Image (cartoon, rainbow, N blue to C red):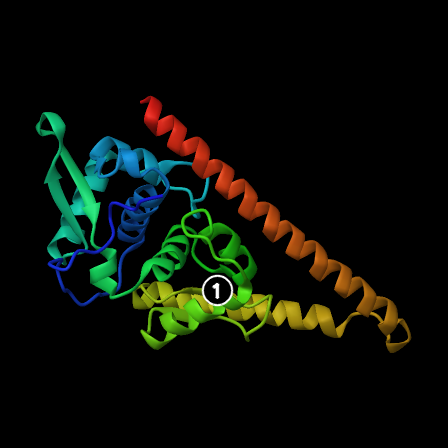
């Protein structure tokens, strides 16, 4: 699948800044649609608004008006993250410059986009979801991408490394970031308390077996999510061709 939003040599070179929740949603949708429905990209204002408000692959759900999306586009254009072009019939369309704006590569873009659209998530879920845009063969390959994003100060680790690690992007404004960290610290404290009140040592063998079975099930679920995401991409492409 050809991504029409891939970076050009003469693209804008702009340093990134934290984004509002609306800016993250609009930018994330532009990248997502460029990768999953390239024939329908760049997007009109109406198509972009629909993408921002769709129920699947979004957290939290939003109900943005075209006017709100247009205002958000203006702020993103002002910092070089988005550009307006003239479409067929002189209809205005919009494209992103995320490659250049963040200074990242193809797989990094897919990962950041999923985080922009959904926020914090486990690395297992992240691999499955990002694979609908760019194939990520394994958690080891994803970890390489995450390490690169960390070096660029674009990724935040919310828990320790491992299969169940939670991560998010680093494009939050400070108030949102403080609230997120506080909320997640409470979540981790609850998880630790639950673990400390778990079964006695006499049942450790059974617990170990159950844990392994749970990890296997999680792995299977992640693979199924990847398959579903790939099928959804195929359906989206067919729908775009029929429009």
Q: Position of residue 234 (x, y in %)?
A: 45, 35
Vertical arrangement, residue 125 with respect to residue 91, above or below: below
Q: Nearer the viewer, residue 230 or 14?
A: 230
Q: Choose top left, top right, bottom left or bottom right for residue 178.
A: bottom left
Which quadrant, please, contains the C terminus? top left
Q: How many marks?
A: 1
Tell me the residue at 69%/72% (across/down): 193
Q: Choose top left, top right, bottom left or bottom right for residue 1.
A: top left
Q: Nearer the viewer, residue 89 or 166?
A: 89
Question: Callout 1: few (<14), some (14-19), or many (20+) C-alpha neighbours within 10 Å?
Answer: many
Vertical arrangement, residue 80 with respect to residue 182, above or below: above
Residue 81 at least partly seen: yes
Horizontally, residue 38 falls left or right of residue 57, namely left
Tell me the residue at 19%/36% (across/down): 67
Horizontally, residue 43 falls left or right of residue 226, namely left
Q: Nearer the viewer, residue 173 or 124?
A: 124
Vertical arrangement, residue 123 with respect to residue 38, above or below: below
Q: Position of residue 146 (x, y in %)?
A: 43, 69
Identify the residue at the far front of this view: 1
Q: Position of residue 121 (x, y in %)?
A: 50, 59
Tell me the residue at 37%/67% (across/down): 177
Q: For mark 1, what is the residue?
A: 142
Tell me the residue at 34%/45% (across/down): 35
Q: Position of residue 102 (x, y in %)?
A: 25, 64
């Amino acid at each position: 699948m050809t991504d029409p939003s891939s970076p050009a040599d003469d693209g804008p070179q702009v340093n990134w800044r934290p984004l509002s929740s609306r800016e993250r949603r609009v930018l994330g949708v532009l990248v997502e649609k460029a990768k999953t429905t390239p024939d329908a990209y760049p997007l009109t204002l109406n198509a972009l608004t629909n993408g921002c408000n769709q129920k699947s692959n979004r957290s939290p759900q939003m109900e943005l008006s075209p006017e709100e999306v247009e205002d958000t586009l203006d702020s993103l254009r002002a910092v070089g993250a988005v550009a307006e072009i003239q479409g067929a019939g002189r209809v205005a369309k919009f494209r992103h410059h995320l490659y250049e704006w963040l200074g990242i590569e193809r797989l990094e873009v897919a990962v950041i986009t999923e985080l922009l659209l959904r926020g914090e998530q486990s690395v297992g879920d992240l691999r499955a979801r990002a694979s609908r845009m760019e194939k990520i063969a394994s958690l080891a390959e994803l970890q390489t991408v995450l390490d690169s994003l960390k070096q660029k100060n674009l990724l935040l680790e919310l828990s320790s490394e491992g299969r169940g690690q939670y991560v998010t992007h680093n494009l939050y404004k400070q108030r949102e970031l403080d609230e997120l960290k506080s909320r997640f610290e409470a979540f981790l404290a609850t998880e630790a308390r639950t673990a400390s009140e778990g079964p006695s040592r006499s049942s450790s063998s059974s617990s170990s077996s159950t844990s392994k079975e749970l990890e296997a099930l999680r792995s299977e679920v992640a693979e199924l999510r990847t398959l579903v995401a790939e099928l959804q991409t195929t359906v989206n492409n067919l729908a775009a061709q029929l429009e």
